[in-house]
Image (cartoon, helix red, strand yellow):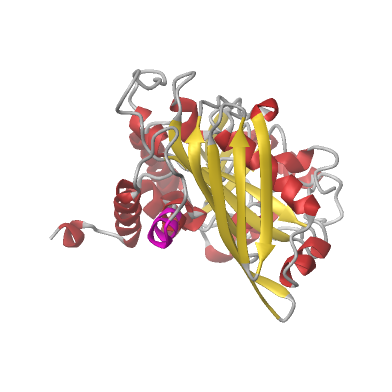
Amino acid sequence: MFIKSLKSPAQLLVACVAFTIAAVPSLRAGEDHRLSDTEFATLHKALHVKNQSWATIPWKVSVTQARQLAARERKPIFLVVNTGNCLGWT
Amino acid sequence: VLNHPDIVKLLRKRFIAIGVDNVDNLNMTAAEKAFLKDRGLKFCTQGMSVFTAGGKLLAMGGGFEPDQVKQMLVKALDNYRPEEPPPVVPPRDNHDAGLIKSPEGAIVLYVSWKVLGGFDSGPPPLKTGSGTYDKKIQDAVGVDRLWVRADEARALAKGNLPESLRRRILPHLTYVLAGAKRDAVRSFDLQLRDGRLTGSFQTKTGESSQLVGFVEAEDGKVTRFDLLVRGMGTRVEDCGFSASLRMVPEGRKVPVALLINLADPRDDLARVPPHRAKHQGYLK
């Protein structure tokens, strides 16, 4: 039912990642930090850049390439500017 | 705000999206800088704009509120008319001095990290502004990249871990597991044997973390690089780029994890230069 209520693949992805993160076992200082195979797989999925919702957008990093693509696909260009790159710290 | 489902959907389907850094790593040609000059390049700290391939400005503003950004995108779409004839965009001058290039034959690794919890016990977590976005920042995954030189990639493919690569990995561990303080690190070792990466990272306060991972290769090329570590982290304030680490109260230790994994070279996200690439000697 919950899955049916998700309206897009992006929403489903966000839900999956949120679920995965919620399932990650927590730790306290001084505890054993070794990872089991299951924990490795769970954390790998939760942290993988391409599993983040924003990363499902086909970002461009070249202004020229973005302009060429926008002209070809007849779409406007959305630009986000940061002190550092919002696509990951630079 | 760029994780909001409605905004992600709009950007995926109706726009060509581009992200740029206007301070540290511009990574633009002179012609690109001139084109963006009045279309957002001068934003202070953060800003968004929408324009056509030919340069007609359609909207400007954005911010941290999803509704505000959504309104901006919808307004821009209303104002958008495809240019006729389509503008001819000159090719990029790939020799322009403003471009930051990865070294020939290098492979790119994504570096990502996250606080795994611990905000709900002990002293209250830090707040940002009105507190509206605290939970989102607590859940945020920090992202960077790491370049592996061609000779290092060849060594990895042969089953050897170059010392230069081990040294380049260390600052990422220090950032996440030692509060970005180099002098807080007691030891770091990392080995590659039979395709398995193993190692440990110790801080002077006694926290010890085990690193585990895998390296696989085919026809002399690295096809898998995964290195994962879980341990205890502390607060790192770094203009927001430390992601969830900025929400950790000073002096408190929380569980964190860091992943370093192979990026797809065809992916534009892999083309954003590593933060530390701006420093001389990064590739040594």
Query: Is B29 on the left-hand or right-hand side of B195?
Result: right
Q: Is residue A44 above or below residue B58?
A: below
Which image quarter: residue B242?
top right
Whole-percent x, y for residue B250 in the image: 48, 18
Specify whether residue B4 is painted magenta: no
Which quadrant: the N terminus of chain B? top left
User: Which region of the structure is painted magenta?
Assistant: A36-43
Q: Is residue B274 visible?
A: no
Residue A16 x/y as whole percent: 31, 56
Left/right placement of residue B13 relative to residue B105 reads left
| Residue beneath the point at 65% across and 27% down | B184
| Image quarter of residue A5 | bottom left
x, y (%) of residue B18? 58, 49
| Residue B91 at least partly seen | yes
Frontmost residue, B179 versus B142: B179
Magenta part, dominant SS: helix
B50 lies left or right of B14: right
Determine whether B251 is above or below B161 in the image: above
For the point 48% across and 35% down, the residue is B232
